[in-house]
Image (tube, rainbow, N blue to C red):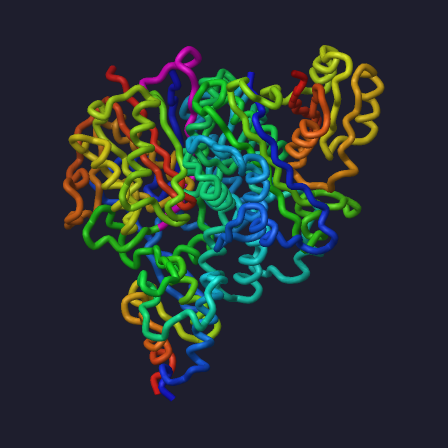
């Protein structure tokens, strides 16, 4: 069993304008950083909200994930190179690798453990948590700070196409982090993830085994009809609604877990789907 | 115990017999590449896989990945369907940019209009590979700069140790990317002539391409003379572009890798250094090794053979080490004509006869990433 | 006019350096014309990445190409020297 020891939420629905995070970061951390762009600011803010006030062991690892990574610096460099035919700045080149964000989060928090930047086409949050859960279960790590970071970009029509979501989708941005440990003492909640993907029958079998009163949250790609079906069949479960408080981004599942733990008491199953395969995460803060 | 079953590699050295010849004789092939640095054209040495014209075209990437996976399965006499419960892990330093987006040279404001409504992103390459081969297990794409595929391999080994998967297919990917080449040129990290690790007059790195695949398992599922014993990955926040030249962070990760693998430093018969021939990397690495080993073991850099293949070097250089030892030797570390006077011992000067033993492999990268792991070939 | 006598040029150079290196707490008046920019005495705490950023700024804003950042750090060490280099007479 592994445990959630801290959560941090940064979740916004930008109103057609890129949020200015520089001042927010300064107000929050009291520090001014050079060479960091919006994506990195976002990463630091979320991580700081989760663990900025804690005394973390320097060996704490960082497993960071994102749907699109530092897409704004990528877009800028791409346009400079191909369109404006000019050279990009050295700082932009370094930040093109999204793992640069992990470096600045580690600097900010004084960490020197393992520092990964991970991607997955359908389930970035779930597989990153799978890697973290496994490393903790094997005692290869004592503590892992898991973060999901996605930035809003000022060209939402382009972003929507590259995300494969329809035009009506409202895009948001978020940086949501949680601190996982294998130890139970002083934990906020337990965390468990089904290690593989499930098919529909396996999912239903799993849902039949959950206790009455369990909350169910559904990933953004879940068809509404299927959500309705699942709620109809599993009458003992309660729907956990978070949808009105956020807009779409790929690492939203971390926001959902953190929001639940901050607001509710109980057990939550987070269900996500892609191409007929399901992934299920479970958090429980019943003491 | 994690076993390494075998691998397949595409790099500038050519096919298996050409690789063997180059490693044995110390004579790799080196090409050149033209780089446009802000309007000024420059030619740098470069290690190409082949002469196929390169565009940042996703289907080219797919075809190279297919070649190594098919080659590996053929070599090990596996059918994709017989690889049950396999996890797939990919490491690349450029996955975020040159590969993540279907870039074409005619990028303009109409790009948005032409662009298809289709999810792209760094996980796309692995996703489509999984579909083509019918793999259904967990998959993860890593970008931790030059340690990407080394970190992918370590996470794969963890998933095997945790019994989450029974086989792990680990891929290293680094193909021609104008963005990468221009970035390195602009940062003045490229050597204009040759890559000379640990040499007093080393003047920078030479980039190369490598696409590679290695298959891991557990002893009880499939035995192998090659084993992955353990390793460590850490992040030092000295500088986003270089390791701490004192070697402190590098030494720490090597010590922890030894500890994790249950190996004493005296048991290491050779160290595959990162050896990029950048001034600060080689300095940090040498200082680090001197702190960890009472008597420095023979060490080498493979980069004069295949170039610095960035995120791909984790798996590519592992495979070159395994191929060499399987052939009974460890190759000479090339191009160190005059040892840097700050260093106490030169890298391997002549082919070394080796058939078994513990080998340490080190990888360091942008973003402060340091990775070290230990493999063993058991004596027959 | 020799660059080191051209106060407007030197001010532009200082603003460019402050911008490229994101040294927001520094004003142009804080940068001494004769202090070595990459020394501890300058108080700017610049590193090799800053040198590359400054080279880029020189190229974009002043049309000056310098190939080698190490040579740049060795030879063009103060605002006065940099100004003279850009504008010898």
Which of the 4 image quadrants contains residue B220?
A: top left
Q: Position of residue A189 (x, y in %)?
A: 62, 21
In the rendered view, tell whether residue B299 sits above or below residue B379.
Answer: below
Residue extent of the magenta highlight: B207-225
Residue B21 seen from this side: no
Q: Total marks drawn? A: 0
Task: Report whether residue A237 is seen.
Answer: yes
Residue A121, by quadrant, is top right
Q: Quadrant of residue A111?
A: top left
Quarter that holds the N terminus of chain B? top left
Q: Please indicate whether residue B42 sits to the left or right of residue B129 in the image.
A: left
Q: Is residue B202 magenta?
A: no
Question: Residue at the location (48% across, 43% down)?
Answer: A108
The answer to which of A14 and B223 lies nearer the viewer is A14
Q: Position of residue A180 (x, y in %)?
A: 54, 26
A101 or B372: which is nearer to us? A101
Q: Is residue A95 above or below residue B348?
A: below
User: Is residue B211 found inside the magenta-colored segment of the image?
Assistant: yes
Q: Residue at x 22, y 32 (%)?
A: B330
The foreground one among A227 and A6 is A6
Please report the residue visible at 39 percent of the width from the left and 22 percent of the height from the top. Answer: B5
Q: Is residue B125 left or right of residue B239?
A: right
Q: x and y percent of residue B130 in the render?
A: 57, 30
Find residue B54 and report its horizontal and vertical position in percent: 47, 52
B210, above or below B80, in the image:
below
Name the image quarter holding the C terminus of chain B: top left
Residue at image coords 46%, 82%: C8
Which of C73 and B325 lies nearest the eye of the viewer?
Answer: C73
**In the rendered image, the vertical position of residue B130 relative to residue A206, given as above or below:** below
């Amino acid at each position: 069993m592994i445990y959630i020891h801290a959560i941090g939420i940064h979740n916004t629905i930008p109103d057609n304008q890129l949020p200015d995070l520089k001042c927010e970061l300064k107000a929050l951390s009291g520090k001014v950083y050079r060479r960091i762009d919006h994506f990195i600011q976002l990463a630091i803010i979320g991580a700081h909200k989760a663990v900025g006030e804690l005394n973390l062991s320097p060996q704490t690892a960082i497993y960071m994930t994102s749907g699109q990574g530092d897409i704004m610096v990528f877009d800028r460099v791409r346009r400079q190179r191909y369109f404006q035919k000019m050279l990009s700045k050295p700082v932009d080149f370094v930040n093109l690798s999204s793992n640069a964000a992990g470096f600045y989060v580690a600097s900010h928090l004084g960490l020197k453990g393992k520092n990964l930047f991970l991607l997955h086409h359908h389930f970035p949050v779930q597989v990153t948590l799978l890697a973290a859960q496994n490393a903790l279960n094997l005692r290869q790590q004592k503590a892992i700070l898991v973060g999901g970071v996605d930035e809003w970009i000022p060209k939402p029509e382009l972003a929507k196409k590259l995300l494969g979501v329809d035009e009506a989708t409202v895009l948001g941005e978020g940086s949501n982090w949680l601190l996982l440990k294998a130890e139970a003492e002083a934990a906020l909640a337990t965390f468990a993830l089904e290690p593989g993907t499930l098919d529909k029958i396996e999912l239903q079998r799993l849902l039949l085994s959950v206790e009455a009163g369990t909350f169910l949250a559904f990933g953004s790609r879940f068809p509404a009809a299927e959500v309705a079906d699942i709620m109809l069949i599993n009458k003992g479960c309660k729907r956990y609604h978070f949808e009105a408080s956020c807009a779409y981004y790929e690492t939203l599942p971390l926001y959902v877990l953190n929001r639940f733990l901050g607001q509710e008491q109980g057990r939550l199953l987070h269900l996500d789907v892609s191409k007929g395969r399901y992934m299920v995460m479970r958090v429980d803060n019943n003491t | 115990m994690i076993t390494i079953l075998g691998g397949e590699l595409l790099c500038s050295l050519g096919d298996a017999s050409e690789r063997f010849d180059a490693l044995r004789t110390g004579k790799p092939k080196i090409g050149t590449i033209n780089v446009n640095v802000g309007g000024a054209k420059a030619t740098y040495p470069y290690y190409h896989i082949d002469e196929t014209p390169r565009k940042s075209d996703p289907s080219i990437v797919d075809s190279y990945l297919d070649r190594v996976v098919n080659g590996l399965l053929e070599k090990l006499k596996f059918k994709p369907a017989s690889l049950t419960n396999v996890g797939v892990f990919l490491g690349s330093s450029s996955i975020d940019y040159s590969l993540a987006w279907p870039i074409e040279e005619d990028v303009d404001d109409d790009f948005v209009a032409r662009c298809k409504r289709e999810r792209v992103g760094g996980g796309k390459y692995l996703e489509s590979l999984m579909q083509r081969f019918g793999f259904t297990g967990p998959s993860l794409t890593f970008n931790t700069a030059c340690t990407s595929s080394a970190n992918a391999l370590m996470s794969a080994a963890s998933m095997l140790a945790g019994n989450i998967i029974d086989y792990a297919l680990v891929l290293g990917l680094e193909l021609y990317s104008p963005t990468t080449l221009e970035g390195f040129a602009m940062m003045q990290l490229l050597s204009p002539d040759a890559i000379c690790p640990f040499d007093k007059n080393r003047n920078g790195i030479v980039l190369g391409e490598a696409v590679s695949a290695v298959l891991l398992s557990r002893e009880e599922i499939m035995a192998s003379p090659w084993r992955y014993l353990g390793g460590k990955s850490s992040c030092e926040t000295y500088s986003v572009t270089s390791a701490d030249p004192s070697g402190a962070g590098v030494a720490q990760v090597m010590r922890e890798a030894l500890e994790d693998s249950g190996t004493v430093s005296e048991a290491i018969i050779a160290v595959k250094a990162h050896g990029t021939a950048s001034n600060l990397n080689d300095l940090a690495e040498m200082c680090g090794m001197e702190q960890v080993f009472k008597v420095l073991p023979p060490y080498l850099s493979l980069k004069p053979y295949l170039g610095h293949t960035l995120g791909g070097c984790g798996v590519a250089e592992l495979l070159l080490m395994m191929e060499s030892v399987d052939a009974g030797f460890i190759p000479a570390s090339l191009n160190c004509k005059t040892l840097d006077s700050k260093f106490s011992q030169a890298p391997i000067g002549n082919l070394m006869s080796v058939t078994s033993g513990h080998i340490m492999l080190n990888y360091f990268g942008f973003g402060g990433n340091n990775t070290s792991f230990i493999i063993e070939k058991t004596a027959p | 006019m020799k660059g080191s006598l051209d106060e407007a040029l030197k001010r532009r150079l200082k603003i460019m350096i402050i911008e490229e290196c994101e040294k927001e707490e520094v004003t142009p008046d804080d940068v001494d014309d004769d202090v070595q920019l990459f020394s501890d005495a300058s108080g700017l705490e610049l590193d090799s990445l800053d040198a590359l950023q400054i080279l880029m700024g020189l190229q974009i804003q002043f049309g000056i190409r310098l190939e080698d950042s190490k040579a740049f750090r060795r030879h063009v060490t103060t605002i006065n020297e940099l100004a003279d280099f850009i504008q010898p007479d």
